[in-house]
């Protein structure tokens, strides 16, 4: 017997329609790549998204066609999100920080019909266009006055939509229809396409806004610092219209000074980004002895948030840190670290230790840790194993069946997605990532967590950034090598840093050596590129070997 409730497909267009009807005057503010600040409302965004939907139709874009973007966070990118998915086409966000060859591969693999790009990426586009034969047009996301000279015959975004009316009714279709596409920025092999649906996106956006997740309210002013090309900016372009938050898009200016300025002028209350961005912001406010007037909480994920960063945000700036974990394949949110009532009474040090964990699953995500034979491991906060997840916004397979079936079936017929992360889970359900499975250091048959060692190093006041990799050792197979970037002007010797580890980690975990460098290599999504470090230091001779 079916329930007798209205049957309405969950569709992305309904988010912007809702924001227009109930938060129509709420602002969307963007720092543009042309220079200056652009300001309009949800109503205007909705109107222009409908114009763009008409323009796409006139260009011959049909349901399921992929439309690529190479763009920063800004109002036009937001309009493209809605005009494409809303009209049953697929919004394909491309990470412009990838190598051009990877971008060519992605555009061709996705069979993108048109690619919209910010002016910043003109040279990139001119370089890749000859290799992307299937692309029917390249659209510069600007107005006529700013159209650049180009070797390509470009389309102009504003001209494109100006010629079209806003008379457009979002079509209704099956909620399982594909809505958007994002390739994983794997460090090895070709990137793989994660294809989201309208249903998965809406369910994920609902969950993202929950109080123990991103905790979004109509009163919030939200700045997604995390790029819209990195796993849908962690749902903010969907979850903000759902909640009715004012949105502030930082454009290309992600340095500490620019982010701080927008925080203050637009009265931002909440933000989200990877640790490296916050390093820049904290450095800026520390150097200039600044305070945040309205900024009260920030979501940090994408890489482990160093406990020292959590402490600085909370103690020095009264900003709550929400440590979160997820992946492109998970839309991306999986866990967020917020206290239950029993943890609210813990002393502050115990709370900080807890906040270093990646947190509890949001309803909708189920997780478990297993050993090499697939046997489930206990939730004791100590045993660590492969982290598996399942849920309605988690990938079941990659576009084009790339890489085969990624799922693992358990004895009861349930399918799980292996995250490639290694983690512990404690008895309260808090998960902590100890490593990417490829990054664990295997010393004498035991595992050493590189993240634990990195967090310890980052707690030293003279350390800006740290990475730990395993280096071949004749007796122990591998031993940890610590690679450190010092804060500008700071003095720090090898012995002093190693001394700092005493009593903080097990003796046999102590790094065998320390190397000081000017900077660490990062991936296109801001993670330390450990494959490069392992390559660079594969011949490193550890002391005593
Ligand atoms: P991506 O698909 O680029 O978002 O990368 C997902 C991967 O980033 C995860 O599988 C983790 O290895 C890593 N990651 C994301 N958030 C965290 C976090 N809070 N702590 C540690 N690793 C993280």
Image: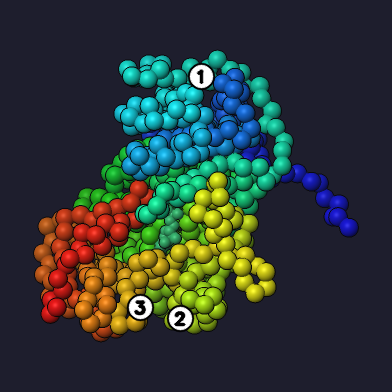
3D distance between C-alphas at marks 2 and 3: 11 Å
User: Is 314 located above or below residue 229 in the figure?
Assistant: below
Asked if residue 545 lies left or right of residue 35, the reply is left
Earlier in the chain: of badge 2 and badge 3, it is: 2
Q: Label 3 neighbourhood size at 10 Å, few (<14), some (14-19), many (20+)?
A: some
Residue 105, how many percent across, how many down?
A: 42, 40
Q: Is mark 3 within 8 Å of ligand 1?
A: no
The quadrant of the rendering that contains the C terminus is bottom left
Is the residue under label 2 in contact with that under label 1 (CB below 8 Å)? no
- The residue depicted at 14 percent of the width and 71 percent of the height is 541
Count residues near mark 2 (Cα–Cα under 10 Å), then give few for <14, some for 14-19, many for 20+.
some
Q: Read off the residue under disc 1.
A: 160
Mark 3 or mark 1: whose residue is earlier in sequence: 1
Please name whichever residue, 103 or 527, is drawn nearer the observer in this view of the structure. 103
Residue hosting label 3: 447
Q: Is residue 438 left or right of residue 491?
A: right
Residue hosting label 2: 383
- The N terminus lies in which quarter of the figure? bottom right
Q: Secondary structure at mark 2?
A: loop
Residue furthest to the right in view is: 1
Ligand 1 quarter of the rendering: bottom left
Which SS class for mark 1? helix
Q: Earlier in the sequence, mark 1 or mark 2?
A: 1
Residue 335, given in percent of the width and then of the height, sits at 51, 63
Q: Nearer the viewer, residue 498 or 64?
A: 64
Work out whether residue 456 can be spotted: no
Residue 148 drawn above or below residue 268: above
């Amino acid at each position: 017997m079916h329930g007798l409730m209205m049957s309405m497909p969950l569709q992305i267009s309904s988010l912007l329609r809702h924001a227009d009807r109930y938060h129509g005057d709420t602002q969307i503010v963007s720092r543009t790549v042309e220079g200056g600040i652009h300001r309009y409302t949800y109503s205007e965004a909705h109107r222009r998204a409908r114009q763009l939907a008409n323009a796409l139709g006139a260009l011959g874009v049909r349901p399921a066609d992929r439309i690529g973007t190479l763009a920063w966070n800004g109002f036009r990118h937001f309009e493209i999100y809605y005009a494409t998915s809303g009209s049953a086409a697929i919004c394909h966000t491309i990470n412009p920080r990838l190598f051009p060859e990877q971008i060519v591969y992605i555009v061709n693999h996705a069979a993108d019909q048109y690619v919209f790009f910010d002016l910043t990426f003109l040279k990139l586009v001119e370089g890749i266009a000859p290799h992307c034969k299937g692309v029917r047009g390249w659209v510069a996301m600007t107005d006529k006055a700013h159209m650049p000279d180009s070797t390509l015959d470009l389309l102009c975004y504003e001209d494109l939509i100006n010629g079209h009316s806003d008379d457009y009714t979002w079509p209704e279709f099956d909620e399982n229809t594909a809505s958007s596409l994002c390739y994983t920025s794997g460090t090895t092999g070709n990137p793989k396409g994660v294809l989201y649906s309208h249903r998965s996106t809406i369910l994920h956006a609902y969950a993202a806004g929950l109080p123990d997740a991103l905790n979004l309210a109509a009163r919030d002013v939200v700045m997604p610092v995390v790029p819209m090309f990195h796993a849908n900016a962690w749902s903010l372009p969907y979850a903000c219209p759902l909640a009715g938050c004012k949105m502030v898009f930082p454009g290309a200016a992600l340095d500490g000074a620019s982010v701080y300025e927008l925080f203050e002028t637009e009265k931002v209350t909440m933000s989200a980004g990877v640790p490296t961005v916050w390093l820049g912001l904290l450095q800026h406010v520390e150097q200039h002895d600044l305070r945040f007037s309205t900024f009260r909480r920030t979501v940090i994920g994408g890489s482990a948030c160093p406990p020292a960063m959590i402490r600085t945000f909370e103690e020095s700036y009264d900003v709550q840190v929400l440590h979160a974990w997820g992946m492109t394949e998970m839309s991306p949110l999986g866990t967020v670290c917020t206290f239950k009532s029993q943890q609210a009474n813990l002393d502050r040090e115990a709370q900080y230790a807890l906040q270093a964990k990646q947190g509890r699953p949001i309803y909708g995500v189920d997780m478990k840790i297993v050993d090499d034979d697939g046997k489930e491991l206990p939730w004791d906060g100590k045993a660590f194993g492969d982290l598996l997840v399942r849920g309605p916004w988690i990938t079941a397979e990659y576009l084009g069946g790339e890489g085969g079936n990624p799922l693992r079936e358990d004895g009861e017929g349930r399918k799980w997605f292996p995250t490639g992360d290694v983690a512990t889970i404690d008895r309260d359900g808090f998960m902590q990532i100890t490593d990417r499975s490829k990054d664990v250091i295997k010393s004498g048959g035991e595992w050493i967590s590189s993240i634990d060692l990195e967090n310890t190093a980052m707690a030293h006041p003279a350390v800006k950034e740290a990475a730990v990799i395993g280096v071949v050792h004749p007796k122990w197979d591998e031993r940890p090598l610590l690679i450190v970037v010092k804060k500008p002007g700071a003095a720090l010797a090898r012995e002093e840093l190693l001394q700092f580890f005493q009593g903080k980690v097990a003796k046999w975990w102590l790094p065998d050596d320390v190397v000081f460098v000017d900077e660490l290599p990062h991936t296109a999504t801001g993670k330390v590129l450990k494959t490069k470090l392992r390559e660079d230091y594969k011949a490193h001779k550890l002391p005593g070997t």
